[in-house]
Image: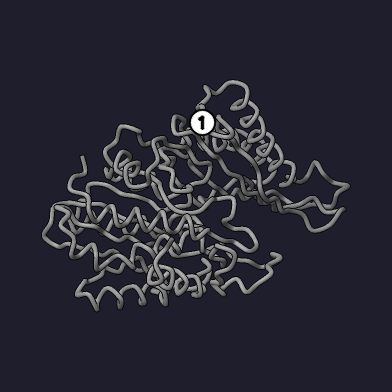
Amino acid sequence: MISAHALELAQTLVRMNTVSHHSNLELIHFIRDHLAKLGVKSRLTFNADKTKANLFATLGEGKSAGVILSGHTDTVPWDGQDWTMDPLSALVKDGNLYGRGSADMKAFIGIAVSHAEQFLNCEAPFAIHLAFSYDEEVGCFGVKELIADLRDASIKPLACIVGEPTSMIPAIAHKGVYRYKCCVRGKEAHSSLTPHSVNAIEMAARVVGRVRDMAEDFEKNEPRFEGFDVPFSTSSVGQFHGGIADNVVPRDAEFRYEFRDLPTANAAQMQSEVVAYAKSLEPAMKKVAPAAGFEFETICEIPSFLGSKDDPVTRLAQELSGEKGTTLVAFGTEAGLFKNAGISTVVCGPGSIQQAHQPDEYVSLEQLGRCEAFMQGLARTRTLG
């Protein structure tokens, strides 16, 4: 069962509104001040307008390169969801902690912070680093700044544990998430004069069709990666906008699409295929309207993650969690970014992704107790393998 102190800290964080389109500074400053009382300095890296920040802190300055405990501080919104309680209530009821971000992933952060003093005073020969980011839910933007700051400061942690909800089962792989916006410029005309126009919706539809063709090809021909619910890469279109009236050939259209690539696939090549096909349509468009064409914008690029059951950090997570096996997860995390930065990484945290982003989101106290035992075991660890 989770201790009162750890639960109180988790509840405090859940009560803070850190939906991605809001600031997270209340939470970041709370953790910074909590650590400062223990004599720990925090490194903050901000977004462009200084409304959000990452926090990085080292517990055990002077010790050898250690383990990062990583979490994101932002949450998804709850607008339109049918909650039976205040999403910021942090209510404890029937063996669960309820509230937005309870599972994804403020409880993990709260439990990690609650053990800061223990990490400071423990005899582990390596440091424990806390790394808490902004804007994970909208594209993993904050952690990129955090990792860049570590590189610039020559801070080289040995390993990273990302505390996303995996039911405390170490996860060693997930797909990437790559999202793009395509804006199509055509030429408007009265719908009785279509030869004098470039129909932006129709041009966009051709590219949408190519995205769909790619999805079908992945399903039919891509080598399987067993362990994923969908063991092949996917592509899909999520939004489409265009047109102003039935009798006006549309000048503009816009659509958004994504790839979720296997760790063994190449998302950049997928996007290049879409762009190349769109560009092949432009010569005919420009014959009618020289300004016609396609423009692409990157919304987010979250790399896939592929660790190993043989990595020392995976074996450490297995030992601390009491789990003999590993798992794969369908959702994206910051793990691929840490791994690409040369930091051995595993994903392991309390709760289930099935409760995340849902009305009445919750994490069980049993899972939180297991997470606390994980932290206590980490403080007793003598080697990272």
Residue shown at 39% from the left, 44% from the top:
336
- Number of marks present in the image shown: 1
Question: Of 321 and 359, which appears nearest the observer?
Answer: 321
Q: Residue furthest left?
A: 62
- Where, quadrant-wise, is the C terminus in this rendering? top left
Q: Is residue 21 above or below residue 307?
A: below
Residue shown at 69% from the left, 64% from the top:
81
Q: Is residue 328 visible?
A: yes
Instruction: Look at the numbered disc 1 and give the secondary structure of its residue.
Output: loop
Question: Of 279 and 264, which appears nearest the observer?
Answer: 264
Q: Which residue is mark 1?
A: 227
> What is the x, y in percent for residue 320?
33, 47
Q: Is residue 231 above or below residue 6?
A: above
> What is the x, y in percent for residue 101?
52, 63
Q: Is residue 340 visible?
A: no
Label 1 crowd (10 A; few <14 / some 14-19 / many >=20)? few
- Where, quadrant-wise, is the N terminus in this rendering? bottom left
The quarter holding residue 30 reads: bottom left
Residue shown at 71% from the left, 40% from the top:
205
Apparent side of residue 54 relative to residue 36 in the rendered image (left or right) = right
